[in-house]
Image (tube, rainbow, N blue to C red):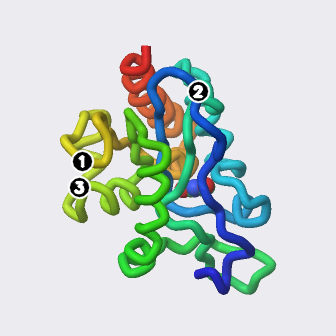
Amino acid sequence: MWKTGTQTVFGEPVGRPGPGPRVMLVGEQPGDQEDREGRPFVGPSGRLLDEALEEAGIDRSQVYVTNTVKHFKWTGDGKRRIHAKPNTTEVRACLPWLEAEIQVFRPDILVCLGATAAQALLGKDFRVTQQRGQPIPSAWAPVVVATVHPSSILRAPDPEARERQREAFVEDLRAVARLIR
Ligand code: URA
């Protein structure tokens, strides 16, 4: 994947966390825009995430945002690069980076955004649809929760479904915000 991606996209912020509980959000992999800019969640999913975090009362600058896989995997002719889901071998190959980020940042609350992150950290049988929003016992952090990936909301079939899914996502993030306060 490092051959097709422009650059490795690590998590951010990279600096020392401020006072208060440390929250880490883990997505799937950088998208087209993230690959070009070298920063996680700066494209359409990132905008949706930022707005949802704000609505839930969480400041993005308070949280560490990263991805399960650190390179953009895509198909297409290169002019239009279409996101391709990372397979289990690729997820496994990238896992040491995520483990290192978790060890350095030491989150109090770890939020898996979507199935790739949830299954990488909580096991392949984990089902986001059934267990979203519930604290999951895990050695990764004192509190681990999973919710949907923001890109799944962008793919909703119509505006009503999209709004419904967006509200459910904000509700999951509000539950995280309550743990912070
Ligand atoms: N989707 C992700 O999972 N991560 C990003 O950084 C961007 C889109």
Q: Indicate the amino acid at tag 2.
A: Gly
Q: How far, Cα to Cα, is label 1 from label 3?
A: 15 Å
9 on left or right of 175: right
Give the secondary structure at mark 2: loop
Identify which residue is drawn at 52% across, 39% down: 162
Return the x and y of residue 148 as percentages of the image width and height.
41, 45
Q: Looking at the picture, which amino acid does disc 1 mark? A: Ala
Q: Quadrant of the C terminus?
A: top left
Residue 154 image position (x, y, % from top left): 57, 48
Q: Alpha-carbon neighbours of circle 3 within 10 Å: few (<14), some, or many (≥20)?
A: some
Residue with the mark numbered 1: 139
Q: Which residue is mark 3?
A: 126
Could you tell me how far apart the alpha carbons at marks 1 and 2 are, in whole angstroms? 23 Å
As drawn, 147 above or below 108 = below
Q: Is residue 174 above or below residue 28?
A: above
Q: Residue at x 66, y 69 (%)?
A: 8
The quadrant of the picture showing ligand 1 is bottom right
Q: Is residue 87 above or below residue 97?
A: below
Helix, strand, or loop for circle 3?
A: loop
